[in-house]
Image (cartoon, rainbow, N blue to C red):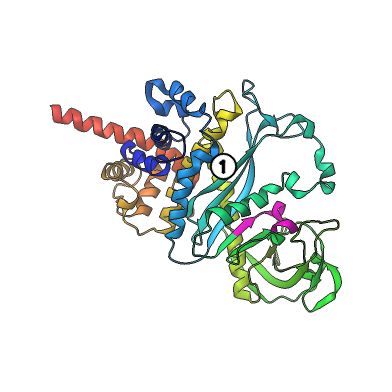
């Protein structure tokens, strides 16, 4: 990416952040722009000759935290969310481990596994629209575990939710309640099996905020229509009739899955000993998507989903299943952060410095993901929406010289596909569109290619 356009982006995402000094926002913008132009490079290399000193000065300030580093980006995320013209807003949350075991000089790390790993745990909330285009990071929850907590998971049933790590799911709901309070659209908060907890569905939330989680607990419920009897939720789903079927293409597995759909409306009762004020029964819908006639040796697809959304018809059930597929987007985001941006290679000496640096890396990872997804959501959008003329000409020239002699870059899709070619995407008949890895590698190479073309033009002008 051209440094000038990257810097404009960086200023939009960081200038005005609550960092205690306006100059720090500009410094963060320069760092992020440099990292976007050279995805995976050290953050200090994006600051010129005094890079290490600039990084140290910024991240060593008491006012510079992960929350303050994200403050302007979250504002921009809310603005982008408000700008959506149709559909619901999807907020997906998940946890990942940032492993710094190889950085023995970092103080303040905590254990991340029973095998002696050390690092930081990160729970993030990513805002998406229904077209699966990311709109921004809504917040980060970073924490480290004390060595004294090893094995404490065995005692979690006697501890209150707010004292457990599972409180992170309630944090995600609170982010939606507070940060997106003024958004005039319905919002769906999505989580994986770990978010299947009574507290999340029972917690107070505005009427336009909905919960969607994959079921992990085969709990006792009361089925609507027979509320006098408690049954296991999995047994109730197995006994419910199929309301319809559909086919789902699985490109990675190169097959089509035939899926049956079931649904129920059930009442959740609070767990035994639950003492929160809002601990009444909760009515929810459950949707069962399961594959029939799966090929031999292939584990059949099976999703059991619980939601506060209405799921009384086949079309609503299919909509809910489609919403849940957005959950894989946050795994892609975490992979971009760790494998593409290489956040786990940060060379900072204290966790207090790592925390705001991680937040800055998250914004860069979001932008890489946005660029990839934008072209898929808006393939016919003009290339000027995502690239400068120098970038467009460079991508077009490179692809013509190295891949396809007649390649033309006119749309956003042409441009992003061209970046994928630069990053190693082969573009064969069944390859689909370039993935995130090809895009971040292509962006890294594109910066040098644009600079080389500029140098050639300067030399030509002098002669």
| Left or right of residue 46: residue 193 | right
Specify the quadrant that holds the N terminus: top left
Location of residue 215 in the rendering, given as x and y in whole percent from the top left corner: 73, 59
79 up-or-down from 52: above or below: below
Near-viewer residue (47 or 435): 47
**Can you see residue 251?**
no
The residue indicated by pointer 1 is: 335
Location of residue 394 in the rendering, given as x and y in whole percent from the top left corner: 29, 41
Which quarter of the picture shows residue 198?
bottom right
Tag 1, which secondary structure?
helix
Q: Residue at x 61, y 60 (%)?
A: 324
Location of residue 340 in the rendering, given as x and y in whole percent from the top left corner: 51, 38
| Left or right of residue 341: residue 386 | left
191 up-or-down from 33: above or below: below
Location of residue 249 in the rendering, given as x and y in whole percent from the top left corner: 57, 62
As drawn, the residue found furthest toward the bottom would be: 225
Q: How many marks?
A: 1
Callout 1: few (<14), some (14-19), or many (20+) C-alpha neighbours within 10 Å? some
Tell me, yes or no, whether the highlighted magenta stretch contains residue 192.
yes
Which quarter of the picture shows residue 230?
bottom right
Near-viewer residue (228 or 247): 228
320 up-or-down from 126: above or below: below
Specify the quadrant that holds the C terminus: top left
Q: Residue at x 61, y 72 (%)?
A: 316
**Can you see residue 238?**
yes
What range is drawn magenta here?
189-200
| Left or right of residue 204: residue 329 | left
Near-viewer residue (268 or 435): 268
Tell me, yes or no, whether the highlighted magenta stretch contains residue 263.
no
Q: Residue at x 65, y 68 (%)?
A: 258
């Amino acid at each position: 990416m051209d440094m000038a356009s990257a810097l404009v982006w960086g200023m939009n995402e960081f200038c005005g952040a609550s960092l205690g000094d306006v100059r720090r926002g500009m410094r963060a913008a320069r760092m992020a722009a440099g990292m976007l132009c050279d995805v995976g490079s050290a953050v200090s290399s994006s600051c010129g000759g005094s890079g290490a000193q600039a990084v140290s000065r910024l991240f060593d300030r008491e006012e510079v935290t992960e929350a303050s580093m994200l403050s302007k980006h979250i504002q921009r995320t809310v603005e982008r969310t408000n700008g959506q013209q149709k559909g619901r807003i999807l907020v997906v949350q998940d946890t990942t481990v940032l492993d710094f075991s190889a950085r023995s000089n970092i103080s303040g790390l905590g254990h991340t596994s029973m095998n002696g790993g050390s690092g930081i745990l990160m729970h993030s909330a990513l805002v998406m629209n229904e077209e699966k285009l990311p709109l921004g990071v809504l917040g980060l929850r970073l924490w480290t575990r004390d060595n004294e907590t090893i094995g404490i998971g065995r005692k979690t049933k006697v501890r209150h939710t707010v004292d457990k790590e599972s409180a992170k799911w309630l944090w995600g709901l609170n982010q939606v309640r507070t940060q997106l309070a003024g958004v005039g659209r319905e919002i769906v908060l999505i989580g994986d099996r770990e978010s299947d907890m009574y507290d999340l569905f029972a917690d107070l939330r505005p009427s336009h905020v909905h919960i969607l989680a994959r079921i992990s607990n085969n709990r006792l419920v009361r089925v609507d229509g027979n509320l006098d009897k408690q049954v296991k939720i999995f047994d109730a789903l197995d006994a419910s009739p199929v309301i319809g079927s559909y086919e789902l293409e699985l490109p990675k597995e190169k097959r089509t899955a035939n899926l049956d759909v079931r649904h129920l409306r059930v009442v959740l009762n609070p767990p035994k000993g639950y003492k929160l004020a809002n601990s009444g029964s909760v009515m929810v819908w459950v949707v069962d998507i399961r594959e029939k006639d799966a090929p031999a040796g292939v584990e059949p697809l099976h999703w059991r989903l619980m939601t506060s959304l209405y799921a009384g018809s086949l079309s609503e059930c299919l909509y809910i299943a489609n919403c849940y597929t957005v959950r894989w987007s946050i795994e892609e985001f975490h992979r971009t952060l760790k494998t593409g941006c290489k956040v786990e290679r940060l060379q900072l000496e204290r966790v207090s410095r790592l925390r705001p640096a991680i937040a800055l890396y998250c914004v860069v990872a979001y932008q890489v993901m946005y660029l990839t997804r934008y072209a898929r959501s808006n393939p016919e959008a003009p290339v000027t929406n995502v690239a400068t003329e120098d970038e467009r000409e460079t991508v077009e020239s490179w692809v013509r010289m190295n891949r396809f002699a007649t390649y033309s870059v006119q749309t956003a899709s042409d441009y992003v596909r061209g970046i994928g070619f630069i990053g190693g995407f082969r573009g064969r008949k069944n390859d689909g569109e370039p993935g995130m890895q090809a895009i971040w590698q292509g962006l890294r190479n594109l910066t040098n290619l644009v600079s080389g073309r500029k140098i050639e033009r300067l030399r030509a002008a002098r002669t």
